Image (cartoon, coloured by chain):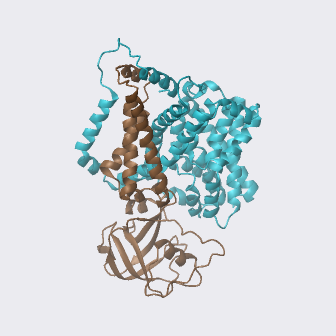
Chain colours: A brown, B cyan
Amino acid sequence: MRRETQNVLLILLGGAVLKICLNGDFTRYVKPSLHPWLIVAALFTIAVAIVSIVRDIRSGSQSDGHDEHEHTHSSRSPWLLLLPALAIFLVAPPALGADKVLRSGTVVAAQPAPGEDFTTLPQDDAPLLSLSEAVMRAVWDDSGSLDNREIRLVGFIVRMGDGSIDLARLTIGCCAADAAPIKVKLQGPDVDTYEPDTWLEVRGTMVADSATEANGYVPTFTATTLTPVPAPADQYEY
Amino acid sequence: MDCLVSNDTEARHRAGSTRPDDRTRRITSLEVFCAIIILAIIFSGPLSRLLSGPGIQTGATVFVAVCVQALPFLVLGVLLSGLIAAFVPPSVFRKLLPSNQNAAVPIAGLAGVALPGCECASVPVARRLMQQGVPPAAALTFLLAAPAVNPVVLVATAVAFPAEPRMVLARFLGSMGTAVVMGWLWARFGNLNWIAERARRRSEPRPGVSRWEVFTETARHDLAEAGGFLVLGALMAAALNVLVPASVFTSLSGQIVVGVLVMAVLAVVLALCSEADAFIAASLSMLPLLPRLVFLVVGPAIDVKLFALQSGTFGRSFALRFGPATFVVAIVCAVLAGVLVLGGVR
């Protein structure tokens, strides 16, 4: 492959990564703390290509000799750099959703570190909890901090294989490849009217002791109100 | 394409020595590139519809995620590789490392602690070390140790297993054991001819080429080459991520031998980054600790993404031998470390 083509491919890839960093779409793929490193990496990728192009132009070697060079030392692997660049520019795959939850097994909520106590919930009316925290409390907190407490949760709808409706979020450690689902069984008025991947804010209470070994420690949440909401800017929990 | 030969050739071209006999016009890669871009833009509608099936969409997201996630680490790797090529003469390594290969291997393993990157960063660096005259056995030990035993990974493991601090020690010993044993095995049985010629050739300082030029050209070339193979690995990892049913995890509880083997295979096919795999392992609480430790030791040593990178960098003949050997050694070392530190299967 000509070095010119390699350079253009590198600029395209760097530009694609820079684009999702600037418009915020990068949170569909990786954890937010990678943001500055992604920008540095994208700029570096673009910079080495530009330095190379400038050097070629300065030395004035836009000669036919390159064709011969390409012929003798051909490597095709850089062509593959087109795939992620085109995927980002043309398709921009959405954040993972219900399909990923259905493909994953049930993952037991993380156990809090020993000695780490659950802080008391804020006293205000129906505090908004992350799904991870709500499920962790439902499974591991013996003090019953969620019993009879009205809370609010945000997640998307998943229709499970057995016909039940779950409210789910995906947690990621590094990037979307290691996404793991966190979910509650959702009960409430007209829950089965919502399409999968619909984002809802639900208000209600966790059913006490509903997370058992038999159901894979998935607690049940009884909602009194369900409000469709736009998907949050950052769809994963961490 | 070989970087050094190509650099020489390119330097010649830049010097203006064209070959008048090669005047025939052919379609060049630049024109192919333009054609692909234009076609992709014209057919972007049907293309996105094609990719909108739920399974394919999940795969596409995972594919982009692996590529995007790996880019900063790959850049770190080529940056180091370029800096070594430009500023660290081979004599430095000859002074630093013992001349005996077997003695150099453990030192290379400990040096791996200092590079807080993932697999993608260590492959270009290991190749560069080899070209700067580091014994191949030591460079390969570094390749295996760097992604597995650096502080970032060990801290992540400690955070993921708050109730089992011994997992950190077990992981460290298992991974370090794998790296050192593979280094010694290479010193004893390895054959330089398995490594592609382009990765072996010593880099010699060339007159008239500035360090800045060596650095940028090396980095640019490594990025384009290794990046391509990384994309290939990401494609495989994304496909397997979608295709491997999660039920394999749950069906394993209680069968320790099968559990160890399946977790080892899963570590290879899922190709998780070494900073995140501890959290996945921690969430599989239906499994005993030993298979999960195997998952953590095998993953950073060999997976599909790494295999693609290795065969691109060192040649297929090398990767086909080194990959399977690493797989077996990593399982054995993980089981030994588990029995020793965790005191059994648990």
The x, y position of residue A149, in whole percent, is 47, 87
The x, y position of residue B204, in whole percent, is 60, 25
Q: Is residue A3 above or below residue A132?
A: above
**Residue B75 in sight here:** yes
The x, y position of residue B74, in whole percent, is 51, 44
Q: Give the side of residue A49 with respect to residue B266, left or right.
A: left
Residue at 40% x, 39% y: name it: A10
Residue at 45% x, 20% y: name it: B12
Q: Is residue B131 above or below residue A120?
A: above
The quadrant of the picture occupied by the C terminus of chain B is bottom right
Which of these two is toward me, B21 or A86? Answer: B21
Which of these two is toward me, B6 or B244? Answer: B6
Which of these two is toward me, B245 or B113? Answer: B113
**Residue A1 in sight here:** no
Residue at 35% x, 14% y: name it: B22
Question: Which of the 4 image quadrants contains residue B106?
Answer: top right
Count the marks.
0
Question: Which of the 4 image quadrants contains residue B58?
Answer: bottom left
Q: Is residue B48 above or below residue B228?
A: below
The x, y position of residue B146, in whole percent, is 63, 45
